[in-house]
Image (cartoon, helix red, strand yellow):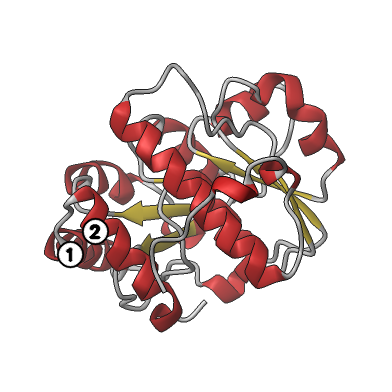
């Protein structure tokens, strides 16, 4: 996805949450400074073809792991990586903003598994603390602001929908979604709004791919897209 395509959705997210674009850009630039000391991954280095399971961190994941087992590739968002690994399911990529389990991301980086590390307005301290301890050759640096190579922007906002946009960019033929709970009652108001945005963005991605995501069945009629 080109940034010009992503930009209207990004600006709608900034408006909805009251985020400051400059904060995202500062975090992006700090991630740039860290990873530019070596040679991180680029989008072109990651191949995610076939059926790709986009594993979310919702409470249903443990009961839906067969979707991941049957997939050709597995992309895990944040803590979904731990659930998959504990179940003996190999991960082909982890997507994280380092807010929950940076030790898992670190270990995967040393195991040679690509880790898409995301910079946004309020995680600069996590980036500074954790990314220098990773194996840079397996880190894909990402941003939701304008890209600044090697920091890229494949699209997406939350760890989960970023994983889906990344898989789409990296050649996925089909996407399946174990562990997705848009209506998770255990989350707070801000997280609930983020899940609503994840749903909107997946609906957009579905339309771009001219396909249907089963995770959106029964929901499409009430999903709005507040950007043009």
Q: Work out whether 141 lies above or below 103.
A: below
Q: With 146 as the anchor, is 92 left or right in this view?
A: right
Q: In terms of image quadrants, where is residue 47?
A: bottom right
Quadrant that contains the C terminus:
bottom left
What x and y, as percent, mark residue 52? 74, 52
Which label is found at residue 124? Answer: none
- Callouts 2 and 1 close, C-beta under 8 Å: yes
For mark 1, what is the residue? 21
The answer to whether residue 109 of the structure is visible from this angle is no
Mark 1: give few (<14), some (14-19) or many (20+) Cα within 10 Å.
some
What kind of element bears circle 1?
helix
For mark 2, what is the residue? 14
Q: In terms of image quadrants, where is residue 207?
A: bottom right
What x and y, as percent, mark residue 176? 74, 46
Q: With 178 as the anchor, is 97 left or right in this view?
A: left
What x and y, as percent, mark residue 126? 24, 42
- Residue at 48 percent across and 61 percent down: it is 137
């Amino acid at each position: 996805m080109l940034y010009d395509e992503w930009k209207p959705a990004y600006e709608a997210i900034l408006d909805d949450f009251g985020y400051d674009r400059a904060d995202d850009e500062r975090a992006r630039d700090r991630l740039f400074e860290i990873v530019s000391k070596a040679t991180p991954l680029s989008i072109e280095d990651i191949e995610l073809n076939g059926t790709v399971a986009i594993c979310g961190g919702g409470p249903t994941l443990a009961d839906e792991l067969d979707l991941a087992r049957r997939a050709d590739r597995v992309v895990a968002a944040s803590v979904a990586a731990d659930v998959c690994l504990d179940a003996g399911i190999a991960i082909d990529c982890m997507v994280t903003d380092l807010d929950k389990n940076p030790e898992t991301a670190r270990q995967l980086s040393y195991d040679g598994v690509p880790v898409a590390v995301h910079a946004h307005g309020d995680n600069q301290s996590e980036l500074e603390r954790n990314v220098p301890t990773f194996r840079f050759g397996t880190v894909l640096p990402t941003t939701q602001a304008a890209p600044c190579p090697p920091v890229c922007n494949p699209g997406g906002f939350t760890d989960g929908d970023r994983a889906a946009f990344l898989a789409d960019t990296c050649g996925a033929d089909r996407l399946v979604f174990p562990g997705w709970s848009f209506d998770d009652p255990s989350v707070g108001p801000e997280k609930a709004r983020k899940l609503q945005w994840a749903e909107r963005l997946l609906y957009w991605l579905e339309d771009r791919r001219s396909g249907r995501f089963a995770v959106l069945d029964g929901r499409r009629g009430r999903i709005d897209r507040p950007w043009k």
